[in-house]
Amino acid sequence: MINFLLSGCNGRMGQAIAENVTERSDISLVCGVDSYLGKTNSFPVYPDFTGINEKVDVIIDFSNPSALDGLLEYALGNNIPCVLCTTGYSDAQLEAINKASEKIAIFRSGNMSLGVNLLIELAKMASKVFGLDYDVEIVEKHHKMKLDAPSGTAIMIADGIASVRTDEPEYIYDRHSVRKKRDTREIGISSIRGGTIVGEHDVIFAGNNEVLTISHQAQSRTLFAVGAINAAAFLADKPAGNYDMSDLLKERY
């Protein structure tokens, strides 16, 4: 049995993970960490990473970038692999994550959905076929409570497309302040926030006289929760290094 600690356990995604893991026989939620202690859980919850008594084999983090320092200190001190699902890290934090991956296994993904990661592969294929003759725009929509923009998934999609292009694309997040024609190097990324939208992503390839749109809609947080749990089970026995959803997919499919 794999025992995991859930960082951000009292948030929306944390509660979804806690609910869905009860159906698993191979992995168990033994404790959580959350600065907000206003919810009742069936497992012990700590306000930070000090004083944890349970045996932990892997950490799932769905919290906030501000929790990273304490999380990495605890993980490195106890040689515990981490599944990092939080988005919005600074460049310095990403550097700290990469440095930590030299000593422990770290799985990081801006989106834990199988469908989204398939969308990225399809977008990469389309970019290879269309080359620089088609303009690329990414539109992401999320609920009004989401703090970061653009979404980590939108950046994942853009990075995937950029990895197969022959130029050095420039990510454009805002067009209202500049009046000029669109440059072929641009990958436009637009964010919409409103209501209770779980997560929607459209990748638009606009060419002369035709448009191809690849879309994904998340209809429940359950798919992200299941993906995070699968990632934790995958990562528990892995050596130090950086891992992502493509590694999990290669092992399972």
Image: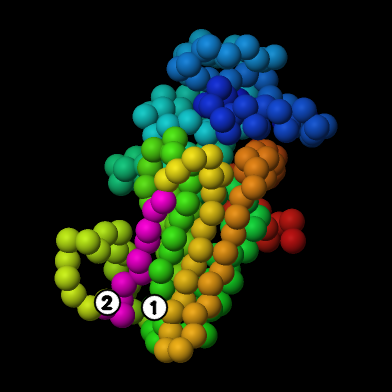
Instruction: Identify the secondary structure beneath mark 2.
Output: loop
Which label sits on residue 94? Answer: none
The front one of 66 and 27 is 66
- The residue at which mark 1 appears reads as 135
| Residue occupying the point 77% across, 28% down | 22
Which label sits on residue 182? Answer: 2
For the C terminus, the image quarter is bottom right
The front one of 174 and 4 is 174
- At label 1, the amino acid type is Asp
The percent coordinates of residue 239 (x first, y second) are: 59, 44
The magenta region covers 183-192
| Residue occupying the point 44% across, 39% down | 144
**In the rendered image, is residue 77 in sight?**
no
> Quick check: 237 above or below 28?
below
- At label 2, the amino acid type is Arg
| Residue occupying the point 43% across, 32% down | 64
The percent coordinates of residue 5 (x first, y second) are: 60, 25
Q: Is residue 91 left or right of residue 196?
A: left
Quadrant location of residue 247?
A: bottom right
> Quick check: 78 above or below 244?
above
The residues tagged by marks 2 and 1 sit, at their Cα atoms, a distance apart of: 9 Å
